[in-house]
Structure formats: structure tokens, C-alpha cells
Amino acid sequence: MAASSKKAFALRLDPAVHAAIERLAAAELRSANAEIEILLREALKARGIEVERTKPAKRGRPPKQKENQNE
């Protein structure tokens, strides 16, 4: 399995904040982690900081190379 391109770190949250995030995430059919990322992006955008999304890793097999076409 390929390594994730996302940065992992520990985040300490007040239990009430975590519970609210989990409720919001469940209502929007997301993980708590995805919900936190969305909330952070919204907060950055509200402060005038636009963060581009990184391109997802390519998945699947690479296309087959055609053998010597000049033969």
C-alpha cells in the first residue's frame, strides 16, 4: 500500500468540541477527520487564505507500453 501524502499529527480537543464535530460529521456522512479538515479550510478561507487541494495520487496500473511500432 502506498504511503499517505497527508500529514499526520496528534490533536488534543475538548471532549465537547470533539463530540460536536462527530455529530456534524455523521450528519454529513464524513469521518471526523474529514470534517475537521473541511472546518479548517473554511476558517482559513474566512481569513483570506485560500489553500489549494493537492492532487490525489495516481491509482491503478500504468498504461501498457506499445511495443516497437515501427516493425
Image (cartoon, helix red, strand yellow):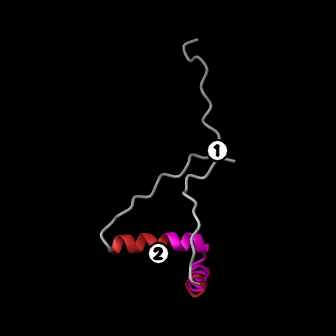
- Residue annotated with mark 2: 39
What amino acid is at disc 1? Gly
Whole-percent x, y for residue 41 in the image: 43, 69
Classify the position of the C terminus by image quarter.
top right
Q: What is the tally of numbered marks visible in this picture? A: 2
Front label number (2 vs 1): 2
Question: Magenta stretch?
Answer: 19-37
Judge whether residue 10 is colored magenta: no
Relative vertical location of residue 61 with respect to residue 50 in this rendering, above or below: above
Q: Could you tell me which secondary element the residue under label 1 belongs to?
A: loop
Q: CA distance from mark 2 to mark 1?
A: 31 Å
| Residue in view at x 53 percent, y 52 percent | 56
Q: Residue 27 lies in magenta, yes or no? A: yes
Residue 70, x across and y down, in percent: 54, 13
Give amino acid for label 2: Leu
Q: Residue at x 61, y 37 (%)?
A: 62
Depth order, front residue of 64/50: 50
> Can you give x and y, in whole percent of width and height, for residue 45 in the image?
35, 70
> Foreground: 28 or 6?
6
| Quadrant position of residue 10 | bottom right
Q: Main secondary structure of the magenta part?
A: helix
- Residue furthest out toward the left: 48
Question: Judging from the image, what secondary structure is the residue with disc 2 in?
Answer: helix
- List x then y, in percent, for residue 44: 37, 70
Which residue has dot 1 on it?
Answer: 60
Q: Residue furthest right?
A: 1
